[in-house]
Amino acid sequence: MGAGPDQPMLLTLREELRSGVWRPGTVRTQTGLRVRFGETHLMTTAVTRVLRDAGLVALNGLTGVRALGPEGQPAHHTSTATDLVVQAIRKRLTDHTYQPGQRMPPQQSLAIEFDTSRTTIQLAFLQLTLEGLLRRHQAAETPGIYVLDPSRKARETLLLADLQVAMRRGGWGSAWRPRPPGAPPPGTSTSPTASSPTARDTPPCGSPRPRSPAARTA
């Protein structure tokens, strides 16, 4: 659920709809979209919901996604349980009931509050993440879904923390250090080269060492 507004599937489909590649009136299935992008059912559903709320598509039943023309989205669509949860959480975000940087309540507690399933809460969180209102943050002391702080400094802090977590998971850990200026890149041999004084003064292995002038006249 770490995706945001730059999620590849969302970006691609939005561009296809705006450019006319996905022609108005054409219906695609969610299954086809999921297979095309290799995404999960939950992600595909969330992406199509974001496109619907942007007035770019209409959702026909459970599986059909119809591209809309310049007239945009129909004036009304039947609200689902997920729509109601998204609207309620979005309102809490805009009126700062949930503050920027705050960790969102557990999904199970929200499911009980809204009398719905945990899957519905997951879908609502994912949709709001794609809209740029929430963000999954793994590097916090308590990993979870957080209200996105719009300030640049806060975003950069989150990105740096997540990068550090990824580096530790990749085996870099605390051993990683910036390379000093002039130091050879990792993996570069540090053995003497032919032009170095050490290489010139050291005879090949097995060769007799040259004697000093005093030794030759003795």
Image (spheres, helix red, strand yellow):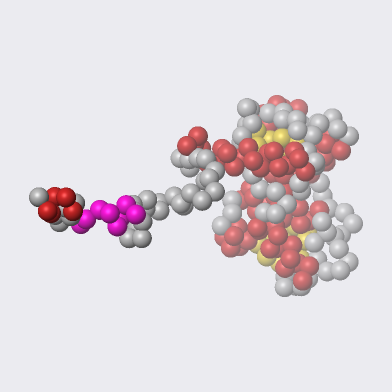
Residue at point 69%, 38% (across, down): 157
Residue 148, relative to residue 26: is it above or below?
A: above
Residue at point 16%, 50% (across, down): 214
**Residue 201 falls within the magenta-colored stretch:** yes
Residue 148, relative to residue 67: is it above or below?
A: above
Q: Is residue 76 left or right of residue 147?
A: right
**Residue 177 falls within the magenta-colored stretch:** no
Q: Is residue 92 left or right of residue 155?
A: right
Answer with the quarter of the image where residue 154 lies: top right
Q: Nearer the viewer, residue 207 or 70?
A: 207
- Asked if residue 110 can be seen in this view, the reply is no
Percent x, y for residue 40?
59, 51
Percent x, y for residue 184?
46, 51
Which residues lie in the magenta part? 197-206
Residue at point 70%, 26% (across, down): 109
Residue at point 74%, 66% (across, down): 15
Answer with the quarter of the image where residue 58 lies: bottom right
Q: Nearer the viewer, residue 214 or 79?
A: 214
Percent x, y for residue 12?
68, 63
